[in-house]
Image (cartoon, helix red, strand yellow):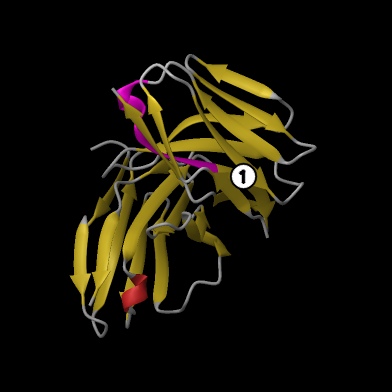
Amino acid sequence: ETGVTQTPRHLVMGMTNKKSLKCEQHLGHNAMYWYKQSAKKPLELMFVYSLEERVENNSVPSRFSPECPNSSHLFLHLHTLQPEDSALYLCASSQDARVYNEQFFGPGTRLTVL
Amino acid sequence: GENVEQHPSTLSVQEGDSAVIKCTYSDSASNYFPWYKQELGKRPQLIIDIRSNVGEKKDQRIAVTLNKTAKHFSLHITETQPEDSAVYFCAASNSGAGSYQLTFGKGTKLSVIP
């Protein structure tokens, strides 16, 4: 499959559960991103990775823990989430995080926290 | 940090009419301004972008203008078609800690009425 893929597409979890979101890019890019998209709010950048190194962490609560084992894969580990964390989580990639260029988004994971 | 305001939040136009979406930004150091289109249930996709050394850019029915002095930029869609119906996001990019971060507006839901 080409482009940016995300799994699962939908996830329902309780506040005490631990789950992980997975993102994979097949574009040969060096930078990957996690965004949170909530209703009636702007897309919020959560994390930026450049060549597997985290370069930005925008004051995200520690219950969200990213992992980037290589430049093609990005994970978001979730634990003890709150209902207000329910949102669409979008992964994106770009050629390089140090210069401005197009970000390609995945289809997102629709997360519901009960 | 950067703050991007986008107006209007919703916009309805008749097919064939023009649509204009406006954004303002706060950080005078921002120098890259992309526009993303997100159709219902789909991922955001870049439709056009402009860099600070250019005042206007056009791609078929879509154009973007940038006024750096006033810190605002606009998306213009001419001869609108039903397939233009989507949510449009503007963004501004600045380089923080060595990486380019995108700060998004809240989005404009455009409805093109046949």
Residue A111: name its quadrant. Answer: bottom left
The residue under the point 31% across, 77% down is A83
Q: Quick one: label 1, few (<14), some, or many (20+) residues within 10 Å?
A: many
Q: Position of residue B4 (x, y in %)?
A: 61, 50
Image quadrant in which the C terminus of chain B is located: top left
Image quadrant in which the N terminus of chain B is located: bottom right
Magenta span of residues: B81-90
Q: Determine whether A25 is above or below B65 in the image.
A: below
The residue under the point 44% across, 45% down is A93
Residue B50: name its quadrant. Answer: top right
Q: Farthest residue in the bottom direction? A: A16
The residue under the point 67% across, 48% down is B94
The residue under the point 76% across, 36% down is B68
Foreground residue among A71 and B84: B84
Q: Position of residue B11 (x, y in %)?
A: 43, 37
Q: Is residue B41 left or right of residue B63?
A: left
Q: Determine whether A37 is above or below B58 in the image.
A: below
Secondary structure of residue under mark 1: strand
Q: Position of residue B42 (x, y in %)?
A: 29, 42
Residue A97 seen in the current view: no
Q: How many labels were placed on the picture?
A: 1
Residue annotated with mark 1? B92
Q: Determine whether A73 is above or below B34 in the image.
A: below
Foreground residue among B6 and B62: B6
